[in-house]
Amino acid sequence: MSADKSFKPTEPQDMQAARPAQGTLTNAAGNSVPNNQQSQSAGPRGPVLLQDHHLLERMAHFNRERVPERVVHAKGGGAYGTFTVTGDIRKYTNAKLFSEVGKQCRMLARFSTVAGERGFADTVRDPRGFSLKFYTEDGNWDMVGNNTPIFFVRDPLKFQDFIHSQKRHPQTGRRSNTMQFDYWSLRPEALHQVMYMFGDRGIPRSFRFMNGYGSHTYSLWNDAGERYWVKWHFHTMQGVQGLTGDQAAQIAAENPDYHLQDLFEAIERGEYPRWKVSVQVIPEKDAETYHTNIFDLTKTVSHKDYPLIEVGEFELNENPKNYFAEIEQAAFEPSNMPRGFGASPDKVLQARLMSYADAHRYRIGINYAALPVNKAVNSVNTYHRDGQTRFDGNFGDAPVYEPNSFGGPAETGPQTDEPALRIDGNADRYGYPETDEDLYGQPAALYELMGRDGQDRLHKNFAGPLATVPDFVRQRFVAHLYKIDERLGKGVDAEIDALKAQPDPMLGQLLTETHTNAAKPEAVGA
Ligand code: HEM
């Protein structure tokens, strides 16, 4: 990677040669535009005239070009593709998508970074979003995952706090190592994911070279009314490859859109990236006795106990024609589940079932599901009507209430409903830190898996940002690392000492965070 300069930005193929004008220019109503160079003015020196509605339309439309960016995962790229079923899982699910081996389905993928804004550099250390939308004959199936099998929080109440710690400091407007490590050290259930992120997989070489994971436990169910808990895995067939921090920094400086370019150009070249799709299948009853809580998003489920079953493969083979229409307006939501697919009691997943559609209504409007990129390929028959920017036929003269006697769409009945789920327990706020605590076991296993060289790189990757944060945050965070594995704690401490021993003007003057150099034990404000 280091020797080749292929990360330099290049222009799209279709901009290599000039083309003649196609059609004639009009305004939004289709009226012809005789002059698009000069505004109308009273005399050659102005002022401009209010009657120049072409100028006014251009100014007004321009002012409204941006929709709010996604509050997280704002920077991303994507493409269309084809999913092919390769394994028979009909005993677990009646989903039409899996009704026969060899079946194909058009799909959309969007990959993203999490914390930064839309103009952020692609090669930062951050998880990557891994969103898939399958346009199945039974409605859309969305799998909104990440490139890691676990997550930072296991209770949705902490999501906003966690994300705020990754975003910008309220006073300086800058991202802050102190906020990040302060939060992680106070909520150590995040450690497993943090270890992943600071390891070799923390900065993928590009979207093509990373795996994806559903991360949560989801479910599948069949006609016999049996439910299986499942974990989805999407393994890159290009091989997993990462960037070192130095490579990533160099690329970020020269080509912040490198990952978008890499995906787009590979597809233009006909080098279609592919992923294998597998599931771990866990019989419903097993969840009650398995040694970890399979609905805890900070933990993985052992592949030895529940091996991967290969079910399909997808290939990305078609670039969008228009980034805004097809990628920025793409609306993924974990609640999009055709018959045969289901959610689970995972508390974070439960919150996500609500959060995404809510975000889309705010970001792109109530009729977002009817936009071409989000529209299901089967017939959509709802009783939703009207709303801003109702750009389709609004269901014409079809009945607007249900039930009705005038031929409106009818519910599909209990045979299409998922099996009942038994739940019990008292309504309460459960968990941290009293119950179900094994915060360090899986991070320790991950550390072991990294091997000696990977461990050394992990120590260095932690030491860089940790050397910039106040002592009390660093000590609290590193104390957790000692509990994971003494070698990890010592390794990181040694790297921090080494960094501090060779004063680096950049580190001293630019990176040290002076705004939070002492703990403030009492809450400020009310
Ligand atoms: C995007 C909420 C956890 C993966 C988003 C968005 C929201 C959100 C509001 C922006 C949606 C939009 O404007 O289009 C939450 C909440 C979470 C949570 C409330 C937990 C309580 C997770 C987890 C994963 C994940 C655990 C992965 C396993 C993603 C991805 C996107 C996203 C990939 C980008 C979707 C796209 O490509 O358009 N999330 N999220 N999120 N989230 Fe989450």
Image (cartoon, helix red, strand yellow):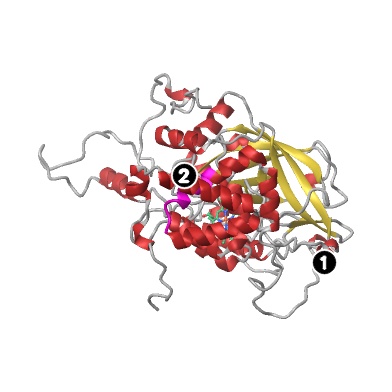
Q: State the image quarter where residue 228 is shown.
A: bottom right
Q: Earlier in the sequence, mark 1 or mark 2?
A: 1
39 displayed left or right of 45: right
On-image quarter of the C terminus = bottom left
192 displayed left or right of 89: left
Q: Secondary structure at mark 2?
A: helix
What is the CA distance from the residue labelled 1 to the residue labelled 2? 48 Å
Q: Position of residue 195 (x, y in %)?
A: 60, 50
Quick check: which quadrant has ligand 1?
bottom right
Query: Does the magenta portion include 363?
Result: no
Residue found at x 12% / y 45%: 47
Tag 1–tag 2 contact (CB < 8 Å): no
* Neighbour tally class for label 1: few under 14, some 14-19, many 20 plus, Cα within 10 Å: few
Quickly name the residue at label 1. Answer: 288
Q: Position of residue 88 (x, y in %)?
A: 85, 43
Q: Position of residue 124 (x, y in %)?
A: 49, 43
Q: Secondary structure at mark 1?
A: helix
Q: Amino acid at mark 1?
A: Glu
Q: State the image quarter where residue 81 is shown.
A: top right
Residue found at x 54% / y 54%: 368
Quickly name the residue at label 2. Answer: 498
Position of 13 relative to 254 (above/below): above
